[in-house]
Image (cartoon, rainbow, N blue to C red):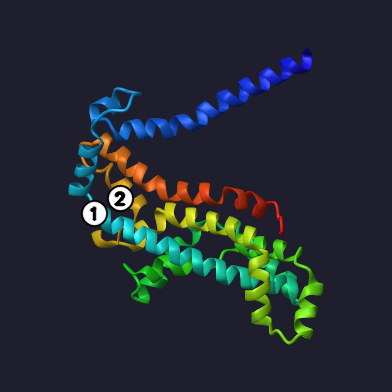
Amino acid sequence: MIRRGKRVLQYVFLTVVSILSVFPIYYMICGATNKSADVVGGRLLPGSYLVSNFQNLILQQNLSAALWNSIRNATIMTLLSLLICSIAGYGFEIYHDKGKDLVMAILLLAMMIPFAVIMIPLFRMFSHMKLINTMTAIVLPAISTPFLIMLFRQSARSFPHDIIEAARIDGLNEMGIFFRMFIPTMRSTYAAAMTITFMGAWNNYLWPKIVLQTNNSITMPVLVANSMGGHYVDYGMLMISVLICTIPTAIIFFALQKNFAEGITGAVK
């Protein structure tokens, strides 16, 4: 009887937490289908203004450019980050050198430095290189991160060294071992790293706001922020811009959630 009561309390607690977690998403969807006055008034039922809000968004903001820029930047950043950080993490673990632990410690210390500290020097550097308003200025600072290098290094520790030695004896070179053996084995880690990197790149606001200074180069988070500017805020239009900005990351996460959990816990298949 006591065990049954505990189970009921657990289900009640999980139900309440689930409702609190899902409610902001439901409110965002309802807000995207209502006019601004209804959103301000706290209406919690879907309305019939979805198409109208979408048309207003297209008329007032450069939605197509923002979507294309965000998709392009996030995709390129994700692919380059996965390639560079996985090679670095693989090298840190597989190859032995006296100074590699010191270099790794320095990389991990870099995680403690806030981005706001290096933001101004980065901007001055890219300004002198005449890279403002270019995709390079967005991608270059983020293609190698200490966290992803550490993640791939930890995963490489579970990669069997006997397989590497056997592949070398069979004549497979180091690049072949990495691309033909390591990458397929560590697909869960790659899925986790891809989810983290893509979501971070897609939701990045501060750095694109600084280095992208033209309307044709804005990204979706900047578009959402621009929707809140001015003396009057159309909350229906704002909600649908947030909804559109949320969809790609939600698709990526739900598609890779199983592999994401396995990759974070270091599972190897």
Cα distance between the residues tagged 2 and 1: 8 Å
Image mark for residue 62? 1
The quadrant of the rendering that contains the C terminus is: bottom right
Q: Is residue 228 above or below residue 134?
A: above
Which comes sooner in the sequence, label 2 or label 1?
1
Q: Are marks 2 and 1 in contact (CB under 8 Å)?
A: yes
- Give the residue at x 57% y 64%: 145
- Along the horizontal axis of the image, is 78 left or right of 227? right
**Residue 165: percent from the left, percent from the top?**
80, 79
Residue 46 visible in the snapshot: yes
Outermost bottom residue: 171
Q: Is residue 98 above or below residue 133?
A: below
**Residue 184: percent from the left, percent from the top?**
64, 67
Q: Which residue is disc 2 drawn over? A: 223
Residue 149 location, quadrant? bottom right
208 vs 192, nearest the viewer = 192
Residue 85 location, quadrant? bottom right
- Give the residue at x 32% y 23%: 43
Q: Is residue 213 above or below residue 32?
A: below
